Amino acid sequence: MKDVVANVFGRAKTFTIVIIKEKSVTNVEVIQNTAASYKHGAGPLMVRTLIDVGVNTVIAGEFGPGVSTLLEQFNVTRVKVKSGTRVAEAVKVFLE
């Protein structure tokens, strides 16, 4: 929860998966972005990864058009926050 929100979704080095039940954090897991160094296609690849683990909301500093379309297609809520925001603070804002 100490990580910060990246500038661009697909270029984040890690993704913090936060499980929330009844407005309380019940579990936190950090996964590596294996596509962060790819020249093209990193965002869509990570969308697929997040969908596969059951994510239903994504918080990021910026979403590209391809990522936005894919997230919409899979009914994943997008929440924009200022890049550099600590994950803990972004989750707090989301819960409010």
Image (tube, rainbow, N blue to C red):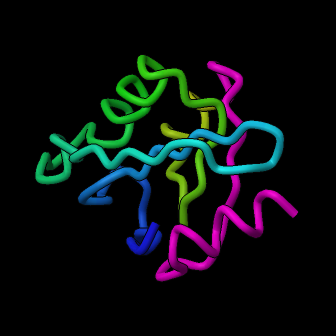
Q: Residue furthest toward the right?
A: 96
Residue at left offset 42%, top offset 17%: 52
Residue 55 drawn in magenta: no
Q: Is residue 7 visible?
A: no
From the viewer's side, name the closer residue of 12 and 90. Answer: 90
Magenta stretch in the rendered image: 72-96
38 relative position to 66: left or right = left
- Apparent side of residue 73 relative to residue 13 in the rendered image (left or right): right
The image quarter containing residue 72 is top right
Residue 75 in the image: state x and y as whole percent.
71, 23
Residue 37: give x, y in percent of width and height.
11, 53
Q: Report which quarter residue 47 is drawn in.
A: top left
Residue 65 relative to residue 47: left or right: right
Which residue is at a point 64% across and 30% down the rendered structure image?
Answer: 56
Q: Say left or right for 18 vs 92.
A: left
Asked whether 94 falls inside the magenta stretch, the response is yes
x, y percent for residue 81: 65, 71
Residue 1 in percent (x, y) is at 46, 66
Residue visible at 46% across and 48% down in the picture:
28
| Residue at x 28%, y 44% (from the top left corner) | 31
Image position of 45 with respect to 60: above or below: above
Q: Is residue 34 above or below residue 36?
A: above
